[in-house]
């Protein structure tokens, strides 16, 4: 009996820490996918989502900050298993999707676009109208497509999954620095194109001086993508999101977070107005 009593006493502090109203820190998953998270180099800790995490803790100072570098597939599994984890770089969806509980949107991304090397971009423009019908391009075995493992592409995801039965013209790249590795393969003409945000190309340009081509996509043309913070769909995760949502007006207005958006969206000078207009009607819960 004494042994069981002692075990209960030892476990009691851990059980108390697990209660939603006793949360003391946010456990953040970081992945090596610049410019969302940048873990080394000239822009270390200046990734868009690195800065977003810092902004959260400026306005939720009672919670400590713990970061852990994890590969994207591991982050997805952790959220599905309701581990005590949050990820700052998610696409806002309905609460029932993908095992995460989402904050209200933090900012918007410009639509995913095709990123291609110069030769492939010219061939695509010669063969297809602009904006490019992605479903047709994905099925075209003349062009080789690549993307990082674990990445999701919003409204374009069903098109990509619908072509998974034709793997001959695609490469899914696992491992660290997936988006940048894909762009390096495109620049070397080992791949023709990928699908991603323009800020991915921006990071590549700043680091290599090489400018790849952007082509608009017909299926998502002019559709902004809402970014959000996602935590595990558990009492822990919901409590964290509640605290973040309460501070969201200050987080969205944070000077450093806005400066980071200016840096990574520099090729679209109207970004701030688009972002402000898109978020204007969305209020914290």
Image (spheres, grey):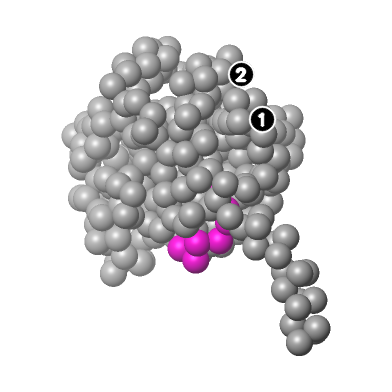
Secondary structure beneath label 2? helix
Q: Indicate left or right for 285 with 127 as reference.
A: right
- Nearer to us of marks 2 and 1 is 1
Identify the residue at image location x=43%, y=27%: 107
Secondary structure at badge 1 equals loop
Asked if the residue under mark 1 is in contact with the one under mark 2, i.e. CB atoms within 8 Å, the reply is no
| Residue under numbered circle 2 | 256
Residue 48 vs residue 230, the one in the foreground: 230
Quadrant the C terminus occupies = top left
Confirm whether residue 40 shows in the render: yes
In the image, the segment drawn in magenta is 80-87
**Mark 2 surroundings within 10 Å by alpha-carbon count, few (fewer than 14), some (14 through 19), many (20 or more):** some
Q: Where does label 1 land, which residue?
A: 61
Residue under the image location 62 percent in, 47 percent down: 23
- Whether residue 198 is visible to the viewer of this picture, yes or no, is no
The front one of 124 and 4 is 4
Q: Name the image quarter holding residue 38.
A: top right
Q: Earlier in the sequence, mark 2 or mark 1?
A: 1
x 56%, y 18%: residue: 254
The vertical placement of 193 against 12, above or below, is: above
* Dominant secondary-structure state across the stretch colored magenta: loop
249 drawn magenta: no
Residue 147 is situated, as x and y percent measured from the top left of the image, at: 45, 52
Alpha carbon distance from label 2 to label 1? 16 Å
């Amino acid at each position: 009996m004494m042994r069981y009593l002692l075990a209960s006493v030892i476990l009691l502090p851990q059980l108390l820490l697990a209660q939603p109203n006793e949360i003391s820190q946010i456990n953040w998953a970081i992945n090596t996918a610049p410019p969302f998270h940048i873990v080394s180099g000239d822009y270390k800790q200046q990734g868009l989502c690195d800065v977003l995490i810092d902004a959260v803790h400026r306005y939720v100072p009672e919670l400590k900050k713990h970061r852990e570098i994890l590969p994207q597939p591991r982050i997805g599994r952790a959220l599905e298993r309701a581990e005590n984890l949050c990820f700052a770089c998610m696409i806002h969806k309905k609460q029932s999707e993908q095992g995460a509980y989402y904050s209200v949107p933090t900012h918007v991304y410009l639509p995913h676009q095709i990123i291609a090397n110069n030769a492939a971009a010219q061939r695509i423009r010669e063969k297809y109208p602009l904006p490019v019908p992605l479903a047709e391009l994905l099925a075209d075995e003349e062009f080789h497509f690549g993307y990082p493992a674990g990445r999701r592409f919003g409204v374009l995801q069903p098109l990509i999954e619908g072509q998974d039965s034709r793997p001959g013209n695609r490469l899914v790249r696992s491992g660290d620095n997936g988006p940048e590795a894909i762009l390096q393969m495109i620049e070397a003409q080992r791949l023709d194109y990928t699908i991603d945000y323009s800020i991915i190309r921006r990071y590549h340009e700043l680091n290599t001086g090489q400018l790849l081509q952007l082509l608009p996509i017909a299926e998502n043309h002019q559709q902004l993508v809402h970014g959000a913070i996602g935590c595990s769909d558990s009492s822990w995760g919901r409590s964290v999101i509640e605290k973040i949502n309460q501070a969201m007006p200050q987080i969205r207005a944070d000077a450093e977070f806005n400066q980071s958006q200016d840096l990574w969206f520099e090729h679209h000078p109207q970004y701030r107005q688009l972002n402000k207009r898109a978020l204007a009607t969305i209020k914290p819960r």
